[in-house]
Image (spheres, rainbow, N blue to C red):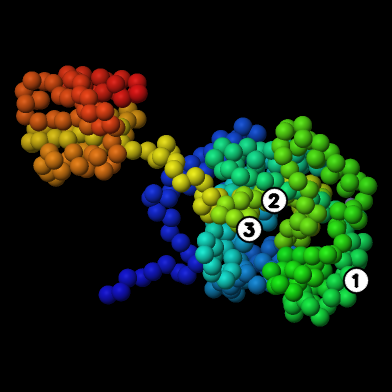
Amino acid sequence: MEIIKAVRGFKDILPGETERWQFVEDTARKVFSDFGFKEIKIPVLEKTELFRRSIGETTDIVEKEMYTFEDRGGESLTLRPEATASVMRAYLEHSLHASDAVSKLFTFGPMFRRERPQKGRYRQFHQINVELLGPGDALVDAEVIYMLMLFLERVRLTGVSLEINSLGCPECRPSFRKVLGEYLAKKEKTLCEDCQRRLGTNPLRVFDCKVEGCKAAVSAAPFLIDYICERCKEHFREDQEGLKALKTAFAVNPRMVRGLDYYTKTTFEVTTKSLGAQNAVAGGGRYDRLVKDLGGPEVPGIGFAVGVERLISLLPELMEDIVRSPDLYIASLGQEARKLAFILCNRLRHLGILAETDYSNRSLKSQMKRSDKLGARYTLLLGENELKERKAFLRNMKGGSQEPVGLDDMENQLVSLLKAR
Ligand SMILES: [Zn+2]
Ligand SMILES: [Zn+2]
């Protein structure tokens, strides 16, 4: 019989890779909690309406990429294409704003978008999401960006660059939309069908289009940043001062328009250069209207998402120190020794030592091979002689040196020997 394989664009993450995932998540948990953030766990499935309202009807995500289906009750549901909308939904549903004026939240998990399959892109992909709700100050923006950069440094990502921009606010953006609309109208014939339609609805979205003609059309378009109002300008200036004060390098990129409608004011993107290509690993921005647009009170917010697959693919090749190998392998010969190995192994685990052994009565040679394969730091040999003399030898697998350990009170001796190095 043929085996059943995973759905196209969906991927298993196997041992050997999961160590990196854990390292990234553990580091995120540590860094974010140092900044006072708390984890929130949210469902992967939501009512379709939530994404239509938050992400925007005319975005690529909502128009083309969502996994939307009717369930058996006839309700339109969607596998979440991003996390912010769900976090906002939970924030409102549980009135988190009522219990605390500031909510600092982060979450990990899979997102789903039915994009064209290409190398390194999956239809189920993972993000780390951070959302900070309550304060609307520019220094908060700088702080959130600083935290992101610190996290990326702690996971050992190199060659990182940070770009920021301001997308203005509902007061100043319409005037730019008009200017841009007029500019693009002159180039209408060079735009793709989608973008021609977007001219009437949301010309800003033309900036995200990947079609060559559209890319060329926007390359000389006016800059949004030249049209933002005084308050937005002041906010952007303070944000930059905050970043400078925290010694965080950045560049202003007036062309950066992130592909979601809900962003206001500060937006940012982190890229790295590897193999000549520029890769975005994280991005985010302020969304001061989103909570209100979803039917809640007027609460400003800012957040970012890190693409975990991308991030992991860019981490250094060699990260041996994040892989946990056995502290000790116990090789045993004979019935009695095997029983002792069984007890000792499990007692050591109980004491926090990663110990391995096997019960299949294999030759000493193959047990030593197994110890080597597992990368054990030490091997303990238990045979008839050792039992008789109440003494065994602990072998350092790297240096080859041996030292005797008495069989009585062996666990405590081993724990102090192994924990000491
Ligand atoms: Zn403004
Ligand atoms: Zn287009």
Q: Position of residue 159 (x, y in %)?
A: 61, 45
**Which of disc 3 and disc 1 is earlier in sequence?**
3
Judge left or right: residue 202 versus residue 30: right
Quarter containing the C terminus: top left
Q: Nearer the viewer, residue 342 or 327?
A: 327
Q: Nearer the viewer, residue 271 or 138?
A: 271
Tag of residue 269: 2
Which of label 1 and label 3 is nearer to you? 1
Q: Is residue 137 above or below residue 168?
A: above
Tag of residue 218: none
State the separation of the CA atoms marked 3 and 2. 16 Å
State the separation of the CA atoms marked 2 and 1. 28 Å
Tag of residue 182: 1
- How many numbered dots are placed on residues in this image? 3
Q: At 34% from the left edge and 30% from the top edge, which residue is drawn? A: 352
Mark 1 neighbour class, 10 Å CA radius: few under 14, some 14 to 19, many 20 or more: some
Which of label 3 and label 2 is nearer to you? 2
**Which of disc 2 and disc 3 is earlier in sequence?**
3
Q: At 77% from the left edge and 52% from the top edge, which residue is drawn? A: 253
State the separation of the CA atoms marked 1 and 3. 32 Å
Q: Amino acid at mark 3?
A: Glu
Mark 2 neighbour class, 10 Å CA radius: few under 14, some 14 to 19, many 20 or more: many
Q: Is residue 291 above or below residue 392?
A: below
| The furthest residue to the front | 276
Task: Name the secondary structure under disc 1.
Answer: helix
